Image: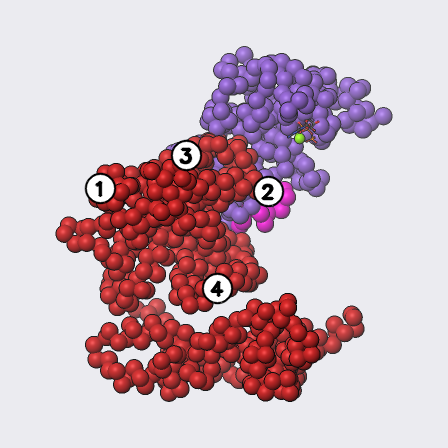
Amino acid sequence: MAILEVENVHTYYGHIHALKGLSLTVEQGEIVTLIGANGAGKTTTLNTISGLLRPREGRIRLRGEDLTTIPPHEIVARGVVQVPEGRRVFARLTVQENLEMGAYVQKDSRRVREGIERVFTLFPRLKERRQQLAGTLSGGEQQMLAMGRALMAQPKVLLLDEPSMGLAPVLVDSIFATIKRLNDDGATILLVEQNARMALQIAHRGYVLQTGEVVLSDTGENLRQNEMVRKAYLGIQ
Amino acid sequence: MNELRRLPVWHSVRIGLIGGVIMLYICLVGMVEVFGRSDIIERVISLGQVLLLLTGLGAGYLAARRAGEPTNALTVLISGVVAGGLTGGLLTGLVVIGSVVNLRAVFINASPALYNALTLGAGPNGAWIPLVGGAALGLVAALFCLLPRRVRQSIVNGLVGVLLAGLFSGLLRVILAARPGWSAELGRFLFASEGLTLAGALLFFILAGGLALLWSQSQATVRERITRLPEAQRKTLRWAMLGLAVILILIFPQISGAFIAQVIVLVGIFALMGLGLNITLGMAGLFDLGFVAFFAISAYTVGLLTSTGEHGIAQWSWWAAAPVGVLLAMIAGAFFGLPVLGIRGDYLAIATLGFGEIVRLLVGSDFLRPWLGGSFGILAIPKPWIGNLELAGPQQIYYLAVFGAVLVAFVAVRLRDSRLGRAWMAIREDEDVAEALGINLVQTKLLAYMLGGAFAGLGGAIFAALVGSIFPHSMNLLVSVNVVALLIVGGMGSIPGVIVGAFALIGLPELFREFDEYRYLLYGIALIAMMLAKPEGLWPSAAIRRELHTDETDETETNPGSSSTVPAS
Ligand SMILES: Nc1ncnc2c1ncn2[C@@H]1O[C@H](COP(=O)(O)OP(=O)(O)OP(=O)(O)O)[C@@H](O)[C@H]1O
Ligand SMILES: [Mg+2]
């Protein structure tokens, strides 16, 4: 059984119909990517899964348990954790405090300390800067911090919203390498990306979204070969 | 224009013009006259004159400082004279224009009396006097600038000492007269019927200036000697200081007399409200302009439950009624928090504004008059008793207020460092992320409103005990505004800042009651000046302080209690 199932979900903003019967599944240990143009509904999908938005119709299940009626903070406690779009770190708190904040659902202080150490081995740059204010970190470091903060909640499924947005090519590479590494360590990841090339390289499977609907889904490898994807998202004629 | 800006006198001209405008303002709103009535040194100088002198000196000083280092003494002097002269020059302009055109139609204070005051009695013929006087002040300020730092400091301290002693001469006299060993002769020697005598002023100048000089010379050695003490002794020293502070706080109302004790109680009550709003606004970032509502609900509850007058319903003791008042204020917090949960930012301020007004209108309404007394309020609220000791006046209620404030400050510190405190902070910093991190927004926000309300409620309960009667008009918007302002002045989110802010915004104005008509004007000026000069507040919270000194992050981090950059209250 898939760890995360999204089934025929319809989400609205007022009467804007943003998700029109979207379905997808994520299996344990997979990286699944969601690609699509601006405004396709990628962020909306993640927000609907994490409970920040409520679908008007459809079901979202985590290991079979229905999430659509559960408040967002309990969804986090059940292990679905989202890294929001645009590196939203707590700018006026230090790196360390940001991480501690990420462990909000974790009450055991020993586990929190272990979690912080784990994040620091994953992102050594953050360790050097643990007392620095998050707002003064570089863009790449902020993205690392945002991911590290989400990891503090010990997610079963990690929802990443455009982690490479606005980063220099070298940093993009290193962020994707980290995502891959997290996955190798056993994390299940739903990755939203505009950078389809990179996303499809590390993803096991992918979905292509257009105006709130899945128009294509296949393995990462097949999608990379797909004529339509190559034209529209990889920029290859 | 750009050519002009490169000239060295440009700064002096700019500062001079600003100074002049301030002078004009002081004159035209009538401060010269009103403040002229209160003498600092009897028959020598009045507060109004001090204001004008300070403006001239200030302009000269700033301009001279600007001309400072790289240039020579002559430039410094010229800058001072130019700025001071311009400052005074605008007043000359005022006198000249005023003697030709009648300005009174617009500026009611532009009277011949004002012109006489500005020209030292010479009238329109003496129009040159402010100009020359200003230039002279600028020169004095520039000369002052050239003095060594230590001398400058002692002169400033001496003058501040005289100014304070003069301003509060009435109070000082009363307080000192109650001391044993104080003779009436000594009193007459130092104090005139209004302000200080010349001899008194001189004495205060030497005292304040000399003490400052002594301290600045010995400060370093004292510090060093303390740090050289063994750890154990330093600890005892710290405890001794703490003990001394506690004793001072305990005997304070006996020294200070009833008036100051009353001021302190008011400061305490506002500090309680400030600590409450510091939770909702300072920690959780939820704006609340209707904070007076919680204060009012608790004050009225205590009033109704204890009053022996016609509206009293239970005639409980204060101790039984106060917890009920606090509890109701807390419930009101939740009640009021619920509908505004989904509202953010600016809209929240408006919504909460409405809540405060609703409560005020309700308690003052004719409809509820049979129960709440309408605009006649609730009278005959008895004082609290401790055993068979009645907390009869401000000198006794003082202990209640101080104890309440200390208790609540302690709770506030514990809350800040708790899991709940972190959740509040997360919501303040970024509500969406906070939610994505698993923070229950509804519960956390409601708790912020409830605890904030409870703290304000304690303030209301003590207020009822202090004044013995409560009226709807004490529950106006100004109270809420005051509480927000004291948070801003003290430093948003900072617990010591609340206390400092309460002293600065509630305590100080109370001491200047005689200038009541200018109270809010000065208050506004102080707030604007504050926003320009020290937007982070007098005692900013650790997070804000770090943000401002990111280069010193490591130092403040290893020593979070360090208060080296912080002024004492
Ligand atoms: N708060 C909102 N109110 C109204 N419409 C919204 C809101 N948020 C998103 N939309 C609309 O819903 C659609 C999907 O938006 P969404 O943010 O999910 O796109 P996206 O795929 O994440 O785009 P991007 O790559 O630019 O982040 C868009 O048409 C957008 O205009
Ligand atoms: Mg998006």
Same-subunit check for callouts 3 and 2:
no
Ligand 2 appears in which quadrant?
top right
Report the amino acid beneath label 1. Answer: Gln
Chain of the residue under the numbered disc 4 shown in the image: B
Identify the mark at residue B231; answer none if there is no mark. Answer: none
Which residue is denoted by mark 1 in the rendering? B315
Mark 4 or 1, nearer chain start? 1
Q: Are marks 1 and 2 in contact (CB under 8 Å)?
A: no
Which residue is denoted by mark 3 in the rendering? B334
Which residue is denoted by mark 4 in the rendering? B517
At mark 1, the secondary structure is loop
A101 above or below B51?
Answer: above
Report the amino acid beneath label 4. Answer: Glu
Residue B229 on the magenta segment:
no
Same-subunit check for callouts 2 and 4:
no
Which residue is denoted by mark 2 in the rendering? A142
Judging from the image, what is the letter of the chain drawn in purple? Answer: A
Residue B321 position within the rendered picture, expressed as x and y whole percent measured from the top left: 26, 41
Corner quadrant of residue B325: top left
At mark 2, the secondary structure is helix
Q: Residues within 10 Å of mark 3 (few under 14, many from 20)?
A: many
The shade of chain B is red
Q: Report how far apart the C-alphas of labels 3 and 2 lie in the structure.
A: 36 Å
Q: Residue at x 63, y 17 (%)?
A: A10
Mark 3 or 1, nearer chain start? 1
